[in-house]
Structure formats: structure tokens, C-alpha cells
């Protein structure tokens, strides 16, 4: 199947900065992976921001892993509040998005544990708690970004087939 490809122009509503992106998936899907076309300065800033996102994920995940392995029960609301207070000045509302994505991962883990317990998972699948955002080969955090749909707007959509 031939996937639509194109170029997207995004403008951050709060900072009023402009980012161009190349879409690899159709624009109407829930998640779009993009390849950014940016200069070196913006690239450095995005990598630093991605590192902060990874650090936030790792901290919330650490708190939840400690609760899980100490058998006190994972308290999603408290850990989300703690992380939000720590990172709200840097990541703002995106801190909540990181915590919620981590919560999704934990809930999926708990669901798989239940399925394993009642024998509905194949024997070769072993549920494991969510991991840290870390590149083991480079021994450093693996940067990632979560972009909320209400923080950016599409200014321009150009099909690559129209351009070439």
C-alpha cells in the first residue's frame, strides 16, 4: 500500500517557533511519526529537551518501580504529582503527558500479569515492568519527545508528489 508522504509546517502556539516536518504516515492517523528538518541550534535544543523528557520518564518510572518491588502498591496519582511539581517549570503540561504515558505502560504490565496468572498468555511471554529510557550501548539516556496536539497547529501541508 502506498502511504501518503508530505511536508508539514508546525508553529508552537506558546513560543511561536516554527518547525518543518516530513510525515511518514497519513496525517489522519492518531500518531504521526515525523522527520524534522531543522538547523543545528534547534537540533541541539530539541536533543536537550528530549533528554529532559527521558529524565522525567526515568524518575517517575523509578518511583513506581520502587513502590512495586517494595510491595506497597503503585500510587499513580502521588507519583504524577511529585514529578509534575519537579518538572513543571521546564516541561510544563508535557510533564503530565510523560507521567500518563508511563501510567499506560504500567497498566499494560499489570494487565499482562493478570493474563499470565490465569494462563491466557503464551508461556514464552514473561511480563516485565516498564523500563528506563536508556541506550545501554552508549550508557546514557535515550531522548524522546511527546508533542501534544493542542500545543502545535498545522500551518501548511504540501504533498511531496506536488513538489517533485
Image: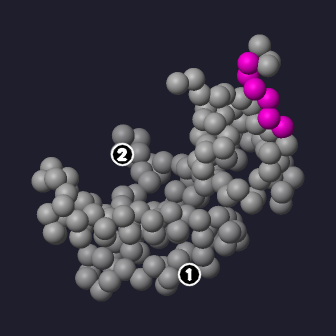
Q: Position of residue 98 (x, y in %)?
A: 55, 64
Q: Position of residue 10 (x, y in %)?
A: 79, 44
Give the mark, 1 or 2, whose residue is nearer the N terminus.
1
Q: Is residue 106 above or below residue 135?
A: below
Asked whether 160 falls inside the magenta stretch, the response is yes
Find residue 64 and report its image quarter: bottom left
Q: Is residue 1 above or below residue 91?
A: above
Q: Position of residue 146 (x, y in %)?
A: 61, 55
In the foreground, 12 or 27: 27
Drawn side of residue 35 relative to residue 40, left or right: left
Could you classify mark 2 by the number of other residues whose Cα lies within 10 Å: few (under 14), some (14-19), or many (20 or more)?
Answer: few
Drawn side of residue 156 relative to residue 125, left or right: right
Drawn side of residue 133 relative to residue 8, left or right: left
**Which mark is in front, 1 or 2?**
1
What's the residue at 31%, 68% (across, down)? 111
Asked whether 10 falls inside the magenta stretch, the response is no
Q: Position of residue 78 (x, y in %)?
A: 49, 84
Question: What is the number of the mark on residue 81?
Answer: 1
**Circle 2: element type:** loop
In the foreground, 92 or 157: 157
- Counting every numbered tag in the picture gives 2
Quadrant where the C terminus lies? top right
Drawn side of residue 81 relative to residue 158, left or right: left
Q: Is residue 31 above or below residue 53?
A: above
Mark 2 lies on residue: 136
What's the residue at 56%, 81% (across, down)? 81
Residue found at the very far top of the displayed protein: 164
- Distance between the Cα atoms at labels 1 and 2? 29 Å
Q: Is residue 82 above or below residue 107?
A: below
What's the residue at 79%, 29% (across, down)? 158
State the extent of the magenta-drawn residues as a range: 156-161
Amino acid at each position: 500500500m502506498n502511504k501518503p508522504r508530505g511536508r508539514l509546517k508546525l508553529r508552537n502556539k506558546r513560543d511561536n517557533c516554527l518547525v518543518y516536518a516530513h510525515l511518514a504516515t497519513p496525517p489522519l492517523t492518531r500518531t504521526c511519526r515525523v522527520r524534522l528538518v531543522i538547523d543545528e541550534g534547534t537540533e541541539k535544543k530539541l536533543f536537550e529537551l528530549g533528554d529532559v523528557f527521558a529524565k522525567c520518564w526515568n524518575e517517575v518510572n523509578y518511583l513506581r518501580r520502587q513502590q512495586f518491588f517494595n510491595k506497597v502498591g503503585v500510587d499513580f496519582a502521588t507519583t504524577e504529582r511529585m514529578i509534575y511539581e519537579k518538572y513543571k517549570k521546564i516541561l510544563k503540561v508535557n510533564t503530565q503527558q510523560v507521567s500518563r504515558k508511563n501510567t499506560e505502560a504500567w497498566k499494560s504490565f499489570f494487565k499482562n500479569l493478570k493474563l499470565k496468572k490465569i494462563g491466557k498468555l503464551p508461556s514464552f511471554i514473561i511480563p516485565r515492568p516498564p523500563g528506563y529510557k536508556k541506550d545501554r550501548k552508549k550508557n546514557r539516556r535515550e531522548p524522546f519527545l511527546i508533542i501534544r496536539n493542542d500545543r502545535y497547529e498545522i500551518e501548511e501541508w504540501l504533498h511531496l508528489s506536488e513538489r517533485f
